[in-house]
Amino acid sequence: MTVTEKPKKLKKKFYEAELARLQNELVKMQEWVASQGLRVCVIFEGRDAAGKGGTIKRIGDQTNPRVVRVVALAAPTEKERSQWYFQRYAAHLPAGGEVVLFDRSWYNRAGVERVMGFCTDEEYREFLRSAPEFEDMLIRSGLILIKYWFSVSDDEQERRFQDRINNPEKRWKLSEMDLHSRARWVDYSRAKDRMFEHTDTETSPWWVVNADDKRRARLNCISHLLSCVPYEDVKSEPLELPERQTDDYVRPPKEAQTTVPEIY
């Protein structure tokens, strides 16, 4: 039996150069989306500590937050629990000229809600029936829907959890639900497998991102996202700065203002 060798870690210099190139393409894509009035919805799901947030952050670093916006919803309120399940997510779907990145999505019902018992068996079964129909409606309406599952191995997730526990700057990333997900690895695995059985469809497939290597995962995901949204480079007219207004205006003295202490 041949053991597959683990690829070498990407050199930082190469990673940063390639990331900058892809981020430049993301800017071109957002300009095309805005100019054409496209609606793009990208779902990020996966194991806790799989690197979804880091990828979303790199997508948003150079893009316009008015065009490319992130949706990361908190636990539903009592009012939201009484609504049609998809209602609160539908309210955040993109309008024309927008890209929405869902950091977790309606698939909470097939994952954490199922495993932790936050929904009934009937609500869970109804979700598995309804989700493909809901997504088909979105796609027929012209929305571009892309779904990513970030896959991380048990050993790598454990390493990242330990890193977060032992690093005060990262400890905030570990929620109570994250700790439960570690304890219920098998339950989450079974829930994910069943979710794929019902919602990995021809019209709305799941794209699995190998996330054991964060740098590769970010580059691969962004590159694939760009390939899913056909775009062109929008040539804008060159900008010219107007002449600044001049008159006898005199700025008030600095002593009249409350200034932040210059410690640095």
Image: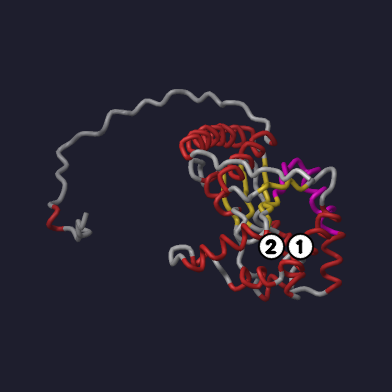
Residue position for label 1: 189
Residue 83's x, y, as percent? Answer: 74, 69
Q: Residue 130 vs residue 208: left or right?
A: right
Task: Identify the residue at horizontal 73%, vertical 43% (top origin).
Answer: 143
Task: Give the label on residue 215, or none.
Answer: none
**Quadrant (top left, top right, bottom left, bottom right) of the C terminus:** bottom left
Q: Residue 44 vs residue 28: left or right?
A: right
Residue type beneath disc 2: Arg
Task: Identify the residue at horizontal 70%, vertical 56% (top origin).
Answer: 90
Residue 244 vertical placement versus 133 (above, below): above
Q: Residue 51 vs residue 89: left or right?
A: left
Residue 110's x, y, as percent? Answer: 77, 63
- Mark 1 residue crowding within 10 angstroms, few (<14) / some (14–19) / many (20+): some
Residue position for label 2: 88
Magenta segment boundaries in residue numbering: 130-148
- The secondary structure type at the circle numbered 1 is helix
